[in-house]
Structures are given as structure tokens and as C-alpha cells.
């Protein structure tokens, strides 16, 4: 893929019930599913219009249901080695999948899981789209040590601070890739010590109030009411019926 080093290029739901998850998200977000033929396991691609944004597969690990993101890098092996030196833990060593690319799964020093990948496609990934309907619009990390996380990701991916918004429990620090003028997400400290560490991905929908009601209608759980966020959008957190956390965002 031709995306710059440090760009978000793919999103993946590892779930305890792939069929039920597909039914939930296709109704909620409007994605069109298509089977990925040739995958080593049952894998369904999620499409927003003509662009694949991610995939759904049964979770082979004892981590419950979880959304994970892929960050594109220039050299997977070099990035894995650097991340390990900086305190990350490898959960899946660098592996090449024919026709897809080379990838590895790690947990950052605070425990947040993610993939690094160098895709084999000559085309750029369009899975992240700040204002594009049905795509991931925001990537948000809740962590136990936001200063350490900012240092780690800055060194590994070159992510740069893009201002911060004060909150009662710490700063909500915006981030961007050097090649992009727009922030792609943020790092924030956990509000409470018992909150899980990890990345939350916000999918863009057209109507936040309708989406809030739809989550509950489809058996999910809303964790907050829609609220205005910087830039004028409205967003909320939720959990799907299998227990994976996610966010939804819509124009104000």
C-alpha cells in the first residue's frame, strides 16, 4: 500500500459470533459484507461503498470480542523490533499472507493491542476517512499513561501532537501523521483506573440519534448519550451484542 508510514489502513473485528456481528453492523452502519476467498479462516470484508474498511472473523484468542486497528508501516520487521525495544509485547510475530501483505500483532507498553502491516496492494487504503460515511472517522486511545503512550507512538510511527483539550482527569491530546494536515485521533488518560486500556474506533453514520436508538434495538448497549465533540460532530460509545466496544459519530 502507498499510505504514508503511520497511517491507519484497516480495521478488524475479532468476535465470538461472526454471523450475529455482521447482522448488527450491516444494519447499524450500512456496510456491505463480502467473503474474502482464499483466507486461511472464515473472513468477511466490510465495505463502505466501493472501499473495504475492515473485516470480521471468529476470534481465535481468549480475548472476547474486540475491534483492532492496523497501522501501515514501511518495514514490518523493523517496526516490530523497534516496538519491542520500547516495551511492546508481540502477540503474533511478523507473518506474510500471500496477496495481502506482511503483518504482526502487538500490545503497546500499556497493553493496547494493534497490528502493524505492509500491504501488498499497489493501491492506497481508504479505510480511514475523516468525514466519509461508513468509514472510520476517529481513532481514540484510552491508556494508563498518556505521556508514555505519546512518546511511544511518536517514536514508532512519527505521530505528531496537534493540540490538546483539557479534561478534569487529564489532556485529550490530538494526533496527526506528518504527511496529513488533519488529526486522525487522540490519546487520553483513563478517567478511572478500572477502565480498560485500548483503542476505540468511531464509525461515521448519518444520524446520531437514530443510530443511538438502533444500537439498543439491535441488542447492543449504549455507554453514553450523543454529545458534541470538537469540530461540531456528535458521538457516543457503545458495545455490540458480543461485547466489542466501538464509537459512532455523525454530523452535528
Image: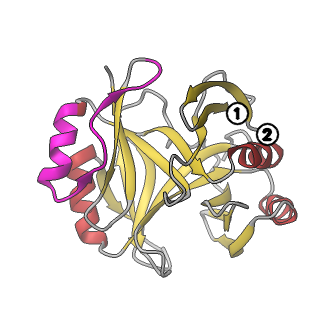
Question: Left of 60 or right of it: where is 223?
Answer: left
Label number found at residue 158: 2
Residue in front for this viewpoint, 232 or 94: 232
Q: Are marks 1 and 2 in contact (CB under 8 Å)?
A: yes
Kindly identify the residue that appears in the image at 47 percent across and 74 percent down: 38
**SS state under label 1:** loop
Q: Residue visible at 57% across and 36% down?
A: 185
Q: Residues within 10 Å of mark 1 (few under 14, many from 20)?
A: many
Q: What residue is disc 1 on?
A: 177
Say whether residue 4 is magenta. Answer: no
Rendering colour mode: secondary structure
The foreground one among 28 and 36 is: 28
From the image, which quarter does the C terminus lie in? top left
Residue 147 position, x and y percent, is 74, 43
Left or right side of 98 for 252:
left
Label 2 element class: loop
Taking the view exactly as shown, the residue that stands out farthest to the left is 217
**In the rendering, at what x and y percent does residue 181 appear?**
66, 21
Q: Whole-Å distance between the Cαs marked 1 and 2? A: 7 Å
Of mark 1 and mark 2, the one earlier in the sequence is 2
Q: Position of residue 90 (x, y in %)?
A: 72, 72
Category of crowding for the residue at label 2, using alpha-carbon neighbours closer than 10 angstroms: few (below 14), some (14–19), many (at least 20)? some
> Does residue 213 appear anywhere in the picture?
yes
Position of residue 71 relative to residue 111, above or below, is above
Magenta extent? 209-231
Residue placed most toward the observer, 33 or 190: 190
Question: Could you say where residue 56 lies in the image, as x and y percent from the top left?
Answer: 39, 64
Q: Is residue 134 visible?
A: no
Amino acid at each position: 500500500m502507498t499510505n504514508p508510514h503511520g497511517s491507519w489502513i484497516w480495521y478488524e473485528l475479532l468476535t465470538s459470533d461472526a454471523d450475529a456481528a455482521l447482522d448488527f453492523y450491516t444494519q447499524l452502519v450500512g456496510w456491505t459484507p463480502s467473503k474474502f476467498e482464499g483466507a486461511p479462516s472464515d473472513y468477511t470484508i466490510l465495505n463502505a461503498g466501493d472501499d473495504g474498511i475492515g473485516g470480521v472473523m471468529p476470534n481465535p484468542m481468549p480475548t472476547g470480542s474486540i475491534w483492532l486497528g492496523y497501522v501501515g508501516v514501511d518495514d514490518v520487521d523493523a517496526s516490530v523490533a523497534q516496538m519491542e525495544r520500547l516495551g511492546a509485547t508481540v502477540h503474533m510475530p511478523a507473518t506474510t499472507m500471500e496477496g495481502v501483505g506482511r503483518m504482526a500483532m502487538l500490545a503497546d507498553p500499556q497493553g493496547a493491542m494493534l497490528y502493524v502491516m505492509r500491504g501488498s496492494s499497489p493501491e492506497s487504503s481508504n479505510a480511514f476517512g475523516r468525514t466519509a460515511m461508513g468509514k472510520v472517522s476517529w481513532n481514540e486511545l484510552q491508556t494508563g499513561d498518556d505521556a508514555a503512550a505519546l512518546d511511544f507512538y511518536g517514536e514508532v510511527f512519527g505521530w505528531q501532537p496537534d493540540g490538546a483539550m483539557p479534561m478534569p482527569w487529564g489532556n485529550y491530546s490530538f494526533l496527526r501523521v506528518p504527511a496529513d494536515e488533519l488529526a486522525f485521533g487522540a490519546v487520553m488518560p483513563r478517567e478511572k483506573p478500572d477502565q480498560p486500556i485500548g483503542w476505540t474506533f468511531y464509525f461515521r453514520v448519518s444520524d446520531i440519534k437514530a443510530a443511538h436508538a438502533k444500537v439498543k434495538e439491535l441488542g447492543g448497549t449504549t455507554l453514553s448519550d450523543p454529545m458534541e465533540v470538537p469540530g461540531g460532530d456528535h458521538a457516543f460509545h457503545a458495545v455490540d451484542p458480543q461485547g466489542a466496544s466501538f464509537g459512532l459519530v455523525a454530523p452535528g
